[in-house]
Amino acid sequence: MGKASAVSRMKVSRRAFLAGSAAIAAGCRVGRAAQVKGRVIILGFDGVKPGIVDKMFEAGELPNLAKLRDQGSYHRLGSSNPPQSPTAWSSFATCKWPGNHGIYDFLRRNPENYLSGLGFGTTNHAKLAPDGSVAKDAEFVNFRKGETFWALASDHGMRCKLLEVPYAYPADKLHNGRMLCGLDVPDIRGTQSTFFAMSEALEVVQNVGGGVRLPLKFKGKAATVRLPGFRNPETKEFIRVPVELMADRAGHKVTVTIQGQKVVLAENTWSDWFEWTFEVTPQFSVRAISRVHVLEAGELVRLYMTCLQCHPRAPYVPISYPNGYAAELADRYGLYKTIGWAYDTKALERDDLTEPLFLEDVRNTMTWRETLMLDELDRGQFDLLAAGWTGTDRVGHMFWRFRDTKHPLYTEEGARKYGRALEDTYVKMDEIVGKAMAKLDEGDLLMVMSDHGFHSFRYGFSVNTWLVRHGYLAIKGKTDPATASTRDKYLMGFDWPRTKAYALGLGSVFLNLKGREGQGTVAPQDAPALVSEIREKLLQVTDPETGDKVLREVYTNEIYKGESEKDAPDLQLGYAEGYQTNKSSAAGGAPAEMLSPNVKKWSGEHAASDVAVTHGILFSNRSVAENPAIVDVGATALKYLGIEAPGDFEGASLI
Ligand SMILES: [Zn+2]
């Protein structure tokens, strides 16, 4: 695409936008692009594996999706490389590959100083003026480059509704549109999710990954916990609010009082939403909501509380567009879950939440989103509607151990109880799709998709340890590559002047490149040979127990082209079934063991699986072109809406 034609497209776009706006202002749909075929509805499910869908088809368990397949089409959908959710959903949003949108992995590093942080975005906390008022509101910054296809559609006068589409945060400003953000929306601490566990079994406060454990000390029947909620952005001190408990051990009940809200909860029950106000200064308070579950209320009292989520009527960081849409939904449905990481995998991982509670939460939350999507379909007034669900992915991550007999945590009893937990979420997906299909108009285009597939995660491979053993990575204070290791994470334990390559994130390997890295050692002219040397050696890595190859493919950065290619990893790992990067190595450490069994409940994975075998799904009520990829979905939507895709789109229309 030449520059001249790109410019002429922009002119056309502008004209079409003005015409569309005028038509909307006049309250009619005449005047929109002449080629509009009908409305577009996209239902996105995180991490649905086509192989499982196929087996369920054989058993007749997904009748609505089978009907959709027979009416239209069903394909495997090519994912991004790596097939991680932030990367893949960013490709969905922008119709571009990571070389352009720049979201490569869960973690990213600043090559100049090797400091690492979250790979997809960050929360900038509110700034306070000296008098205690807010000088600057909190905001979330997404590192993704490129405009979303729905923002483009909106610029052409299309009315868009975006309902919890993953990694589409913050909200775009849409003309006559509505957007409720999902995955990526932080809690009021600015984290992806921080739960609270309160228990008599604890002696001291424990800050565990993704949660805070607080000891309960009863005096008679009463105990008070001063819960550290919001952190003052200036002093960094937590604002603490008392949670008062009154235990009725004989009756297996606990009375919970928080800021004047008093609720009696029987063992094994959830509270409704508690509303919190954390007064930071007389001029600035932060509101939040959370729910409490009583796990035990007998000899031992033990409670779980969700993270402190943004209050939909007064969110600490904006969670919708327009801002008032989140509050409007609270008026419509009552208070609702706003945290982007909607299922508490960390609490389940650490036994602060149970499997049945986790699955109950998945069912309820999927239903809430279903209700929202169906209501917004009924309310009409849109040209493009996209809605997202993440339960399919999270159950895959947490319950794979019960469906893979070779998984280190597999048990027959577990398989009997939870072996079909994932299929249950697919059945729920099928019901959601069926209900949406029943509401379609004749001209509507429906696409049902997932961003990537899934694999078992039996063994963790420490790529950093491998780099140490092969003389590419050096550890501070250690000289023998045969034994060197470090417990330090986030690249803090590495000796840069002696290092040629290092890994950070779930599948990224970087050279320590002169001119890019602060203490680079590899000359740019030597980089291509070193990349292919490391690649060749990595492809030879086998599991000593089975002789199986650990990596199915290792990609070089030639696959990443575009305006963000300078941020790309030099090598992208593509694991074989059963293998993934060990968590400590992913966090920029180098543990002693190179290959270790995965004994975590997080037992299914896809993050650095070989993209060639990690397809998602694409169903449509129309036939679509062969070999569709995730960047094509938005391009297809735009074409159906009569909008020509910009010249820099890497996706193309499938119909
Ligand atoms: Zn996932």
Image (cartoon, grey):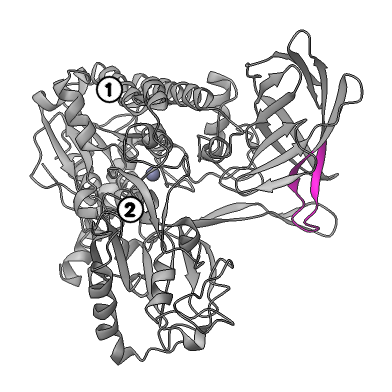
User: What's under tag 2, amino acid-wise?
Assistant: Tyr
Q: Which mark is residue 430?
A: 1
516 lies above or below 192: below
Place residue 431 in its image quadrant.
top left
Whether ligand 1 has any atom under 8 Å from the Cβ at mark 2 is answered as no
Q: Using the rendered image of the protein, determine whether residue 308 is visible from the camera's viewpoint.
A: yes
Is residue 230 on the magenta stretch? yes
Instruction: Name the residue that disc number 2 marks.
Output: 579
Which span of residues is magenta-colored?
A: 227-241
Q: Badge 1: few (under 14), some or many (20 or more) residues near its Cα, within 10 Å?
A: some
At horizontal 45% and vertical 42% (from top left) the residue drawn is: 602
Q: Which three-letter amino acid code belongs to the residue tagged 1?
A: Asp
Name the image quarter holding the N terminus: bottom left
Relative horizontal placement of residue 333, taking residue 81 as reference (left or right):
right
Q: Is residue 122 magenta?
A: no
Q: Residue at x 39, y 66 (%)?
A: 463
Q: Position of residue 22 (x, y in %)?
A: 33, 40
Q: Quadrant of residue 35?
A: top left
Q: Nearer the viewer, residue 430 or 622?
A: 430
Q: Nearer the viewer, residue 14 or 214?
A: 214
Closer to the eye: label 1 or 2: 2
Q: Quadrant of residue 651?
A: bottom left
Of residues 204 and 54, the one nearer the viewer is 204
Q: In the image, residue 647 lies at what x, y percent? A: 20, 61
**For the residues bearing labels 1 and 2, Cβ distance under 8 angstroms:** no
Disc 2 crowd, CA 10 A, few/some/many (<14, 14-19, 20+) = many
